[in-house]
Amino acid sequence: MPEAVRRGAEPAGRGTDSARQGRRLPPALRKTVTVVHVVASVALIGEVWALVVLNVTASLTDDIGLAHAAYRLLGTLVFTGGIPLSVIALISGIVLALTSRWGLVRHYWVLGKLVLLVATVLAGMFLFDPEGMAAAAEGAAAVGGGRRWEQVGVVAAQLAMLLAAAVLSVFKPLGRIRPGRA
């Protein structure tokens, strides 16, 4: 029996597998990071759902005080929930991808989840304006109907992207990006 086989060395041509093994997390740590990722991702979906509900409430009411309070609460939710949860989900997802057989750009579903989360964050950064909406409502002036519904559309799109990412996590469609490569 060859020496390499007796010592449990990798067969020829499988060097990438053994190299990848060095980047794997210990099982307990991997499970911990997975729990953090799932909890942050699910909490983020709940936070965005709350943004949708508050935005629709503010858009439909004729009560300027209620609209102002709802828009103010939106900002609080974004800064105390949305931003930290997005960062935690992004970092933990990248750590899991880089330390597992799935890889970050090895399978379509993993790359899709990354793109959807980054798109969700960018939509929140550049399109969602709860402070502006609250300021407009505070002045006792009616916020323009188009602007109100634009804000509802932004958070609804964020919710749809996060739900799509959850579906990708469960069904893992489309296979590998580059078949036959490690």
Image (cartoon, helix red, strand yellow):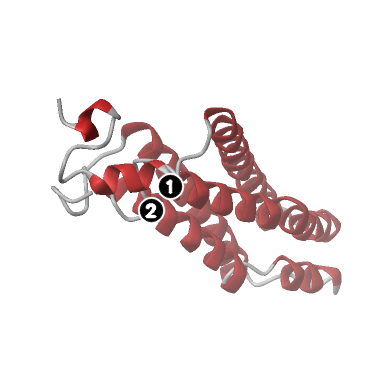
Query: Can you say whether 119 is above or below 144 in the image?
Result: above
* Residue under pointer 1: 97
Query: Can you say whether 133 is above or below 116 in the image?
Result: below
Residue 130: image location, x then y, percent: 71, 65
The residue at 32%/33% (across/down) is 171
Q: Are marks 1 and 2 in contact (CB under 8 Å)?
A: yes
Give the quarter of the image for residue 143: bottom right
Query: Can you say whether 74 is above or below 147 in the image?
Result: above
Left or right relative to 4: residue 64: right
Check disc 1: other Cα within 10 Å, few if <14, some if 14-19, many if 20+.
many
Amino acid on which the number 1 mark rests in the picture = Ala
Q: Secondary structure at mark 2?
A: loop
The residue at 51%/54% (across/down) is 158
The residue at 47%/62% (across/down) is 119
Give the quarter of the image for residue 172: top left
Left or right relative to 136: residue 8: left
Find residue 119 and name its label: none
* Residue under pointer 2: 104
**Of marks 1 and 2, which one's residue comes earlier in the chain?**
1
Residue 14: image location, x then y, percent: 21, 43
From the viewer's side, name the closer residue of 22 and 73: 22
Residue at mark 1 to residue at mark 2: CA–CA distance: 5 Å
